[in-house]
Image (cartoon, rainbow, N blue to C red):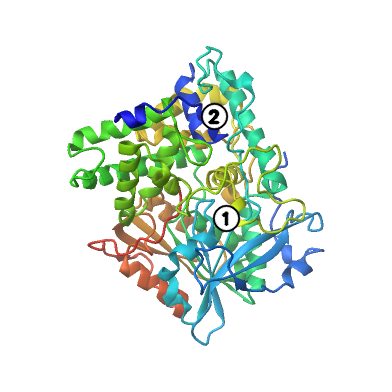
Amino acid sequence: MPAKVKQQSRRSAVRRGAGAGVLALALVGASLPAAVAADSPSGPAGRPGMARFYDQKVAWGRCAGPDMPRDLQCGKVTVPLDYAHPGSGTLDLALARYRATGSGHRAVLLNFGGPGASGVNQLAAGGKEFMDLTNGSDVVSFDPRGVGRSSPVSCGVGEEPPSDSSDSSGSGAGVEVSSPQQLMTLLRQSAELCAKHSGPVLEHIGTVNAARDMDVIRQALGQKKLDYLGFSYGTRLGAVYAAQFPRKVGRMVLDGVDTLTEPLAEQGAAGAQGQQTALEGFLDWCVTDVGCPFGQDRRAADDQVLQLVRSLDANPVPTDFGGTLSGQDLVGAIGQGLYSKELWPSLERALAALVEDGDARRVLSFASGGSGLPMRASGSGEADGAAKKDGGLTDPGQVPIDNLTAALMAVDCADDPDRPTAAQLTKDLTDLRASYVAASPVFGRYRLTQLLMCYGRPKGTDYIRDSVKNVPAPRMLLVGTRGDPATPYRWAEETARRLGSSAVVLDNKGDGHTGYASSKCVHRKVDDFLMYGTLPPDRSSCPADGKAWSSTLSTDP
């Protein structure tokens, strides 16, 4: 690879805190293979102490920040920190909306996925996609608890785990481990860093509570029923809401359908395989352009990508924000850029700037979820950006740099009841690593790291896997895309069977993550349902568009 990247001084990947880079590297060097889930979520509106949350109305005003559209309005709602004890503390959730231009008084609530994507930032960046819906409905999005301005979680970027977790060989890398026991220690210390920097919201994060929050938002918007459009992880959130509040479901669309049943280990392998397929498509396109940083030899391009990742894992490059960019950080950024073909030119330019000039800024904009460059690096010993017991919204400039990845791990772990013991992980690690790398040489270790990050955290809820099924809600539209790199089409079929007779499946024959922004046909059918209540026939399909026609939606990492 170019000397500019090679010559950067060697930095410890642990500078990224508890992010993916350090633990993925620990996996490379491995010589061998609390508060608990939420209680039953029935009927929170009728519980003692809940009336004040359901009685509030949103006070809308101008959005803070120089890049916010002038016609976008912002507000907040207050929700209980702990629904089991609604008097024990509160959280404020950030909202944003585009007002209806027609005479209707409906509202459509959006979730852009992740988990960890800021709904406020995504709506500000991609609002033009939803302007048709404003003919009769407000279009509203929000930062879920633990995300963006809503008590953001963090794993402490810039703070290293205790020195006893470092490699004892004296290499100074601080990332290799000599035994499975050392790996387990590093994982446990990483979980402790996340708890230290996230504050009390971490114990109450997850989809079950986020869905409860959505019902408070529904009432605060003055809606008897919730009209909802969820992308990717947002489909899991929508399905959980429907199971909790079936009589409050209005017109619900789930696009890029997530699984409700597969364990994280299987989800990660499927995700790695889908991302590898998307990367191969990107490289097929890239090598036809003279500006491709991997040249014009398609067979050599695969090796060059892998070489770049490994080089940055060995020698992370410093960034302008006080941290470093490791190979695994790069993998996460590439994954973000693969979600839409319309993002490919921007991804190509970001990779060229990194390879040719050692400039990581454009790559970092992908790594931060497309919501702009990272705001800051945290280094204090306190909960950075997290809500206090009765905290308000976090200032936009104080959202931690790692909030997207920290929230993703926190929510996924809170939603998953499986917690293998150290002995089980040690026994299975070699096979897991082999299967993930076989699924994707580039994305395998990154996705395996996300799985291992749940070790040392409290056991997640079993509600989603056990109880979200045969939902007695009105008919819902599920959109599955055949060439989706993140949420395989089979998940749409499986989730439809889980939800039961309420599920109507639309088969999108195209490519890309989700269909609303990449298919005119899907866009039209979703709008027809949300605006007029017109559902397509179950198992009907949309043909693949000749060319993706939109570039504003970017969801999961």
Residue 518: image location, x then y, percent:
33, 62
Dot 1 corresponds to which residue? 468
Viewer-side residue, 40 vs 171? 171
The residue at 65%/66% (across/down) is 76
Residue 51: image location, x then y, percent:
78, 69
Of the two numbered discs 1 and 2 in the rendering, the one whose residue sits closer to the viewer: 2
Which amino acid is tagged 2?
A: Val
Counting residues from the start of the chain, the first of labels 1 and 2 encountered is 2
Give the answer, above or below, for where 119 lies relative to 412. Answer: below
SS class, disc 1: loop
Which amino acid is tagged 1?
A: Val
The residue at 22%/47% (across/down) is 285
SS class, disc 2: helix
Left or right, residue 519 beside residue 92: left
Give the answer, above or below, for where 472 lies relative to 202. Answer: below
Give the answer, above or below, for where 12 lies relative to 540. Answer: above
Q: Specify the quadrant of the image occupied by residue 440.
A: top left
Give the answer, above or below, for where 109 lies relative to 335. Answer: below
Viewer-side residue, 248 vs 324? 324
Q: Quadrant of the N terminus?
A: top left
Residue 248: image location, x then y, percent:
61, 71
Real-space CA distance between mark 1 and mark 2, rounded to the nearest whole angstrom? 38 Å
Q: Is residue 72 visible?
A: yes
Left or right, residue 176 beside residue 528: right
Q: Is residue 470 visible?
A: no
Dot 2 corresponds to which residue? 14
Viewer-side residue, 110 vs 289? 289
Left or right, residue 546 beside residue 171: left
Neighbour class for label 1 at 10 Å: few (<14), some, many (≥20)? Answer: many
Tell me how many marks there are: 2
Viewer-side residue, 154 vs 547? 154
Q: Are marks 1 and 2 in contact (CB under 8 Å)?
A: no
